[in-house]
Amino acid sequence: PWLSVEVKNKETLPLWLHGAMHQAKASATDGQLPIAVLHEVGTPYARSLVVVELGTFTEWFGSNTDSSDA
């Protein structure tokens, strides 16, 4: 109830996005949440997007839904 979710299904996601998540996961130490921050040049950093894998998100914050297809 505390999230407003919009899901976008794409055939593939950009390789650079996969690379960013891979780097975040590779550099995370125990107890750190790996995220990728996507910033558009010329916009305030506060409007950047935070990307986290759904499985990791639910591990950290829980889930009220069935994630059997995750």
Image: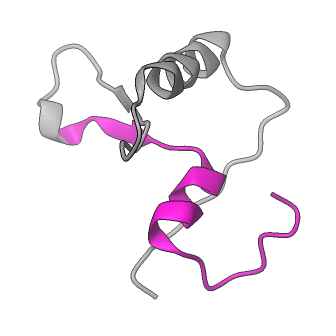
> How many marks can you see?
0
> Up-down: is 29 above or below 56?
above
Q: Quadrant of the C terminus?
A: bottom right
Q: Which residues are magenta?
A: 47-70
The image shows residue 13 at horizontal and vertical percentages of: 71, 25
| Residue positioned 88% across, 62% down in the render | 69
The image shows residue 33 at horizontal and vertical percentages of: 40, 44
> Up-down: is 43 above or below 50?
above
Q: Nearer the viewer, residue 50 or 63?
A: 63
The verdict on residue 50 being magenta is yes
| Residue positioned 44% across, 37% down in the render | 34
The verdict on residue 23 being magenta is no
Relative side of 41 to 55, left or right: left
The image shows residue 6 at horizontal and vertical percentages of: 57, 61
Residue 19 position by quadrant: top right
| Residue positioned 80% across, 26% down in the render | 12
Residue 42 position by quadrant: top left
Residue 53 position by quadrant: top right
Q: Nearer the viewer, residue 10 or 68?
A: 68
Relative side of 61 to 12, left or right: left
Q: How is the image coloured?
A: one colour
Q: Residue furthest front?
A: 30
Relative side of 57 to 29, left or right: right
Relative side of 7 to 34, left or right: right
| Residue positioned 65% across, 55% down in the render | 55
> Up-down: is 7 above or below 18?
below
